[in-house]
Amino acid sequence: MENAKDTFYVTLRNRLAALNPNRVIILRGVQRPGILMEEAEAPVAQLPADAFVLRWTALDVDVQLPSVLAQMTCEVHYTTGGTEANAGLDRGRTLEGMDAELLGILSPNCAPKMNFTQTPTATMATKVFWGEPQFSTLTTQRERLTRVVKINVFTFQERGEL
């Protein structure tokens, strides 16, 4: 399932870099696209603003099929306080822009599964695919607007995968 999670993340990261090259974060002194996988980073007290944070929360496996089908739930968390130029008064529009970006990078809703543990990266025999995003009601905490979007991600397990 790690290959599927990595593939989903890298696919969204690459699509975000193409869709909005200005959505970046600096993490450990390195500038990169504004998306990260929470389990692969050091814990933080507060989510980074204006970035997408992927959090894997659930796993279900169907072993009744000829190949094992894994369904994982990914929550995408994002928050914004708007822009400094507008004193944060545009935070609603900024969040709406992030909603649109997320919809943009989720389409198309599949990608070839990759194995990133080898060099060069290897394309696997199956795909990773996902359902429609489920947008939560936005929440407000101080000056920040936050949204959580749930996405069900599916993959067939291949021989030798954990």
Image (tube, rainbow, N blue to C red):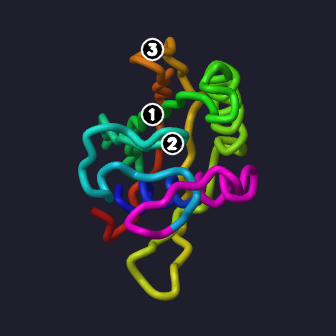
Residue drawn 53% across the image and 31% down it: 80
Badge 2 vs badge 1, beta-carbon distance below 8 Å: yes
For marks 1 and 3, give the CA distance.
Answer: 11 Å
Residue type marked 2:
Phe
Pointer 1 local density, CA inside 10 Å: few below 14, some 14–19, many at least 20: some
Label 1: which secondary element: strand
Q: Mark 2 — residue?
A: 52
Q: Nearer the viewer, mark 1 or mark 3?
A: 3
- The residue segment tinted magenta is 11-30
Q: Position of residue 19 (x, y in %)?
A: 75, 51
Q: Mark 1 — residue?
A: 77
Which of marks 1 and 2 precedes in the sequence?
2
Q: Mark 3 — residue?
A: 139
Q: Residue furthest bottom?
A: 119
Pointer 2 local density, CA inside 10 Å: few below 14, some 14–19, many at least 20: many
Residue type marked 3:
Thr
Residue drawn 49% across the image and 31% down it: 79
Q: Mark number for residue 121?
A: none
For marks 2 and 1, give the CA distance.
Answer: 6 Å
For marks 2 and 3, give the CA distance.
Answer: 16 Å
- Tell me if residue 21 is in the magenta stretch: yes
Q: Quadrant of residue 90?
A: top right
Label 3: which secondary element: strand
Residue drawn 24% across the image and 50% down it: 43
Q: Quadrant of residue 112?
A: bottom right
Q: Is residue 60 visible from the viewing direction of this image?
A: no
Q: Is residue 14 visible from the viewing direction of this image?
A: yes
